[in-house]
Image (cartoon, helix red, strand yellow):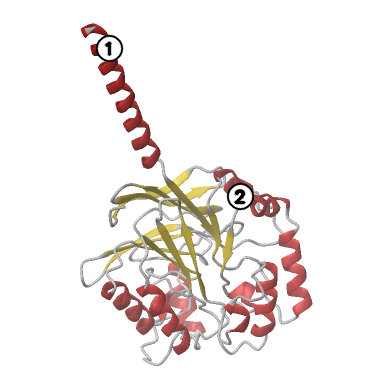
Amino acid sequence: MRMRLSNAFFYTRLIFLIGCLASAYTFAEERTLIAFGSCSHQDKPLNILSTIAREKPDAMLFLGDNVYGDTDDFDVLVKKYETLGNNPNFKTLKRGTRIHAIWDDHDFGLNDGGKAFEFKAQAKVAFLDFWQVPKNDLRYKQDDGIYHSQWLRNDNGRTVHIIFPDLRWNRDDIQSVGRLDYMAKRKPKNMGPYSHDETKQKTMLGRQQWTWLEAELAKPADIKILASSLQVLSDHTGWEAWKNFPYDFERLSKNIQQNKLDNMLLISGDTHWAEISKQTLTNGQTLWEVTSSGLSEEWKAISPNKHRASEAYYKNNYGLIDVRWGHDKADVLFGFKDINGEYVSKKALNLKLDAH
């Protein structure tokens, strides 16, 4: 009898321990996977989209230049979207993946275009229709751009809040150096023609969108992602970026610090190369940004970036945010991959969470 009781106790304990291990393993493997990219020319094969589809991400974020429209003819723009929509690799991705998008200048309709572009209302309709945004969505009604936010929630109640600002609709004129200065001083350094504009009232977002963005940043979430069509942290590149509008960047930085957004990740596109950037804010918080570009486009003449924290990679690429949820933390792998699905550069982050 004593032996049988001992065996029963042993097996009961063994089953209990196996159950605990299985439960811990399951929770440790709770995962959210977000892919992102930019600069996908509709006339190119875009094989990389099938590579992304094989990742089986919870969402794919298109960060602008999703087609190369560059037109003020609505029918021409629609046909370019149709070309992308008929691409077999795009169809493969769309069939099994939740997709969200924001535009940049080429799907806006004008290279480096801003608020003065007269075709933007028609371009907005073409954008929203192609990405199958529901007709009751606020983006159809709001009169100052297609900014929006999205939420991902897992079965354990963990949340990822993705914020998509519109950096085209309201953007003031951008300051540029003269052609002679550009050719003599900028171009030899692979820099673009644009520079910081210290005019305080100049903005990319506009008053109404700033009110919206500040409200979005204040909303609680386990992880926040700013999905920007333009680079946020890069500086001294000479190309379009948040830093060309210093008061916009300072206001964003202030809001991140005031809201204590230690779990904020920045993603961006536009450049035709990929890189990781890092900047420490005045309160000591470190911001990380992954720029992924392009899905089809490449640019070998990589510009300087004083906040670059990885190698820069000009071949086709896509970004990944790979989140493994724990009880009171999230282990995040944040980086970009090549067309074969191999990491080129990545950063491991450990984000603290409220215990669940």
Can residue 170 be seen here? The reply is: yes
Name the residue carrying label 1.
7
Q: Can you give x and y, in whole percent of width and height, for residue 340 in the image?
A: 56, 42
Using the image as rendered, state which of residue 170 and residue 69 is in the foreground: 170
Cα–Cα span, label 2 and label 1: 57 Å
Height in image: 65 above or below 121?
A: above
- What is the number of the mark on residue 201? none
In the rendered picture of this protein, how many numbered marks are placed on residues? Answer: 2
Can residue 206 be seen here? The reply is: no
Q: Can you give x and y, in whole percent of width and height, for residue 172 in the image?
A: 49, 88
Using the image as rendered, state which of residue 48 and residue 5 is in the foreground: 5
In the rendered view, does 226 fall on the left or right side of 139?
Answer: left
Q: Amino acid at mark 2?
A: Ile
In the rendered view, does 130 fall on the left or right side of 157?
Answer: right
Question: Which one is closest to the eye, mark 2 or mark 1?
Answer: 1
Height in image: 351 above or below 122?
A: above
Mark 2: secondary structure: helix
Residue at 40% in and 38% down: 26
Disc on the earlier residue, 2 or 1 = 1
Residue at 70% in and 75% down: 126
Residue at 55% in and 57% down: 60
Q: Amino acid at mark 1?
A: Asn
Callout 1: 10 Å neighbours few (<14), some, many (20+)?
A: few
Q: Can you give x and y, in whole percent of width and height, for residue 199 in the image?
A: 38, 91
Circles 2 and 1: CB atoms closer than 8 Å? no
- What is the number of the mark on residue 48? 2
**In the figure, residue 189 lies in which quadrant?**
bottom left
